[in-house]
Image (tube, helix red, strand yellow):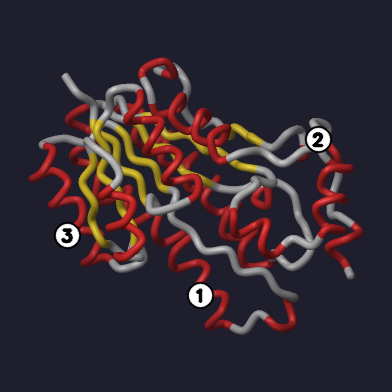
Amino acid sequence: MTKIAVVTGAARGIGLATTKLFLSKGWQVAMIDRDGAALADAVTALDGVHGIDCDVSDPASVAGMVAEVTRHFGQIDALVNNAGVADFGPIEKTDFARWRRVMDTNLDGVFLTTQAAIPALKATKGSIVNIASISGLRASTLRVAYGTSKAAVIQLTLQQAVELGEHGIRANVVAPGPVRTKLAMAVHSQDIIDAYHDALPLNRYGSEDEIAQAIVFLASPEASYITGQVLAADGGFEATGIGLPALRD
């Protein structure tokens, strides 16, 4: 029987790479994103997908999305909570509205989407893969909201693994390190790029496809005895210390 994955933040970047990898392995994918135009473009280029415009921070939107997925596909075998916002700034300049904007998507979205999908995941003994960040494992400058949200996602995943395991549902986290996305390359200065390369044991950024490989593995039956784990796909960055001088300027 064909397996069905739900991937949030699927219109671009890691979410799109993950969608393509699922498809290459014979899965079908519900692609979820709140950028309707970008989602429509992505869906048009792919077979075996169904696009749904959804804001994961809105409970009503999430409920409608999960209902549509189950109507269209009949089941959910894997949920990949990838949707997120990257907002970096000093603590003193992070007002509460900015803080909430990050938490609404990065943390609340993971909670809401997973909660809504639990009945469907119980039926298939499915899996959850939440996308955190290396910033949830190690502190760094300018990431008070972002890093805190991703650390909370890691703890939320552990709660999910403990509580849902008795239903056969697995929950794991992928924590990407620096990844060569279009957004990262647009905002990282050459000094920052050089500093990351120096700090990473593998001396390079990761690729979206490399992160997708970790996600799809944890979502798949090949990881059937793995739950409650944090996989840092980070080129060894977690092992190297705290902070980067180039980010402190």
- The local crowd at label 1, few if under 14, some if 14 to 19, many if 20 or more residues have their Cα within 10 Å, is some
In the drawing, does residue 45 fall left or right of residue 244?
left
Residue visible at 53% across and 35% down? 209
- The local crowd at label 3, few if under 14, some if 14 to 19, many if 20 or more residues have their Cα within 10 Å, is few
Q: Nearer the viewer, mark 1 or mark 3?
A: 3
Write down the quadrant of residue 139 in the picture: bottom right
Q: Amino acid at mark 2?
A: Ala
To which residue does mark 3 refer? Answer: 64
Instruction: Give the quarter of the figure containing the N terminus.
Output: top left
Q: Which of pointers 2 and 1 lies earlier in the amino acid sequence?
A: 1
Residue 63 vs 174, above or below: the answer is below
Residue visible at 52% across and 63% down? 85
Decide which of 115, 206 is in the foreground and name it: 206
Secondary structure of residue under mark 3: helix
Q: Mark on residue 239?
A: 2
Give the CA separation, mark 1 to mark 3.
23 Å
Q: Amino acid at mark 3?
A: Gly
